[in-house]
Image (cartoon, rainbow, N blue to C red):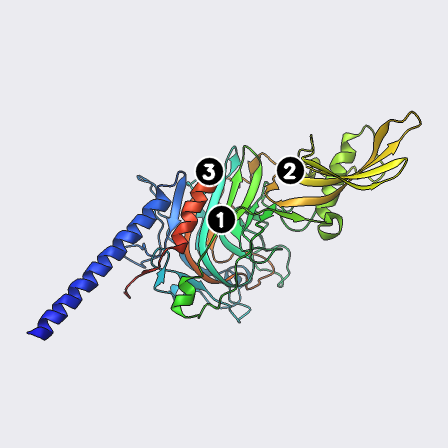
Amino acid sequence: MKLTLTLITALLLAQLTALRAADTAADRVATVMNTPGCVAFWDFVKREPDGAHRFTAHVMAGAANDFALDASNYIKDYWGEGREATYADFPLLGRGPFGQAVRIRKEEDKTFRPFLFVPRERLHDSPIDIKGAGKSVSVVVWAIRESGNHALAGIWHEGTDLNHGGVAKVVARGQRQYALFAGLNKEGSACGHVSENGAKSFGHIYAMHKSNSGDVSPVVPADAPAEVLDASWQCFAMTYNHETHELTGWLNGQDTGRWQENVQKAIPVIHNAWVQGNLHRESGLQPGEDPTFPADQFYNPPEDKPVSVKILSEAADERVELQEFRYTRVKVTHRKAADGTWTATARDLADVRLNPWWFSHDSLFTPANDGTGGPFTIGRVIHSSRGVGFTGWIGGVAVFNRALSSEQLATLSAVGRSRPIVTPSR
């Protein structure tokens, strides 16, 4: 009789624990979905009830599309190499901020780069197809980074026309709109990326409009013990505000600033875009001006009034200042005339702010209405270099059609720091 009562008690406790976990999971999903502007949220718990049981998104009430995720190996799709990808290539953790997480593995087979995605034909003109003028966007991803600095989620088809990994059988130009990365040039940071043309920027071969948070995420082995993984969730986020033209990277609810110093050496294409824009403003062809440089690729953030001025050197007839504006630091040389007046005789871009980044365009790339735009992908993006990219665990992906506030991102970040939710095995 004691054994029976013990067993019954244990079963009741297990059911109560499961009920509490379910309530908590529902509360967390509600926190995300009730955040203004949420158009899709994949928690990797919600699946199709029938058929392939693919992961689907929580969507707005009345939405016709729940954005089921397919699995694919883009090397096979574009180069005709490697094997097909299936859901079996994305191991499940069985726990996470919302109850589940998928693993993006460090694939050793160079012909195998699997990702989860919504094909373009199933998302074109849908709520996650954020594009055109007057549009803002935010992407939030809860993840544990094992390695890498590349894509987490977004519409960011980089194209297969650069042939870094060999000539592709299916050659496609870039179809970039917006995406969140795990750092790119600043590994481990939260990196927001947007594009006005789907392709390159400033004459470079790649898109260059990106922000990098000052904070960086730690490296955590994907096979670490459960208690280590539970304490390692990071909330990566990007926001683009079309009203301010600001692109910002957020890590764990913080938009810590970052500057790129000595930009002429570090990112010469941005320096040149700034120089060409300033030369173009002057009447006539100026020394050093390239008349063939596209006017829509100038990079000239607002520099009306400096927020600070630092004297770098000063002599009787010359003074050199470093004038800091919101998005740039400009080295300005002044010379003293015979009448005692000072005149600025030279200006040069010294540093550029990477977080927030000033986006110089009024519109996000709008693919033609013929299905040629990029898919929405999670874990990787299609790109010519065919690199491994980000590896680790992804426990949630959310897309918003507005720029979230710091308070909203702090709330979403707190979800990842809460105790994990464990999902029983199917």
Residue type (three-letter) at the residue carrying disc 2: Arg
Quadrant of image for the N terminus: bottom left
Q: Residue 222 appears at what percent x and percent y?
A: 46, 67
Task: Using the numbered discs, state the Cα–Cα distance from disc 1 to disc 2 in whole angstroms.
Answer: 21 Å
Question: Where in the figure is residue 180, as x and y percent of width and height?
Answer: 52, 50
> Are circles 1 and 3 on residues that touch, CB within 8 Å?
no
Marks 1 and 3, how far apart at CA: 13 Å
Q: Counting other residues with Cα less than 10 Å from the Cα at mark 3, is it few (<14), some (14-19), or many (20 or more)?
A: many
Residue 71: quadrant of the picture: bottom left
Q: Secondary structure at mark 1?
A: strand
Question: Which of the pair 418/273 is nearer the observer?
Answer: 418
Q: Which mark is residue 326?
A: 2
> Residue 237 shows which numbered tag?
1
Three-letter amino acid code of the residue under disc 1: Ala
Inspect this view and state whether residue 82 appears: yes
Q: Earlier in the sequence, mark 3 or mark 2?
A: 2
The image shows residue 241 at horizontal and vertical percentages of 53, 37
Asked whether, in this view, residue 150 is left or right of residue 410, the answer is: right
Kindly indicate whether the residue at mark 2 contacts the one at mark 1 (C-beta within 8 angstroms): no
Disc 3 marks a residue whose amino acid type is: Arg
Q: Residue furthest top?
A: 339
Q: Which mark is residue 358?
A: none
